[in-house]
Image (tube, coloured by chain):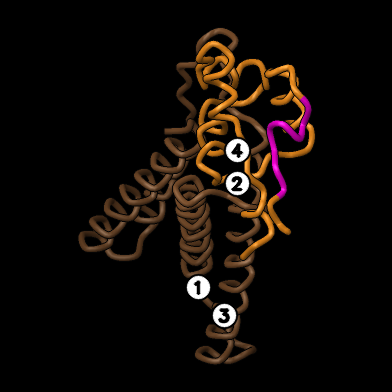
Amino acid sequence: MPEELAIKNHIRRLRFEHGEMTQEQLAKQAGVTRHTIMALEAGKYLPSLLLAFRIAQAFGVDLEDVFEFDGG
Amino acid sequence: MAVQEKRAWFMLSVILVTLAVYFAFISMVRFDSVSISVFALTGFLGWRRSKRRRGEITYDERDRQIEKQALLSSLCVFYGLILVLSLAVGFTHGWDASVPLWMVIQIFWAVSLVIWAIKALIIIVLYRRGAHA
């Protein structure tokens, strides 16, 4: 299994926990396009460290609450 | 559909139209400066139509990464094609032979079209499949 697939994210869950935040709203706060948020949620894209921090900041949580390393 | 992906489809359309018009001209007037001038249609590749709303982000790190990957792959193909075509011309015409100018121009345009087409195709594939660095 490629290493990148071992990183999971909880963006979709966090969006709903934050007042059903839309992908558009999150994208705007993180400074990316909505397509990138969609790709992240679908597990098709690994964000840069900077974007990962921005997303965590948008939710007001720590990085580990958004991204999870599942590589064993 | 992402802006870059739409643009890639547009690029493919321009390339296909250019090739269609070119072959139509070739069948009518053969190899001629008129046929070569058809490649001017590729100028539309640089055309950008933007309906960007105020404050909307249309390009980010993922788009940049996909574009970079597509460009690198198309450049690899470019160098491969240049190598193969150079050897082919050398072996078929002899290494001291001269080739007509129209052939050089046509090869240049053909290779350019291939590069643009490959870049557009890779962009489309990466947006569909997902881009993992």
CB-based contact (under 8 Å), mark 1 and mark 4? no
On the rendered structure, is A55 left or right of B109? right
Q: Chain of mark 1?
A: B
Name the residue beneath numbered marker 1. B100
Residue type at mark 1 is Pro
Which label sits on residue B84?
Answer: 3
Residue type at mark 4 is Asp
Nearest to N terminus: mark 3 or mark 2: 2
Residue B82 appears in the figure: yes
| Boundaries of the magenta span | A62-69
Name the residue beneath numbered marker 2. B66
SS of the residue at dot 4?
A: helix
Nearest to N terminus: mark 2 or mark 1: 2
Decide: is B57 above or below B53. below
Q: Note the chain letter of the brown one.
A: B
Q: Nearer the viewer, mark 1 or mark 4?
A: 4
The image quadrant that residue B26 belongs to is bottom left
Pointer 4 local density, CA inside 10 Å: few below 14, some 14–19, many at least 20: many
Name the residue beneath numbered marker 4. B63
Q: Nearer the viewer, mark 2 or mark 1?
A: 2
Residue A51 belongs to magenta span: no
Q: Note the chain letter of the orange one.
A: A
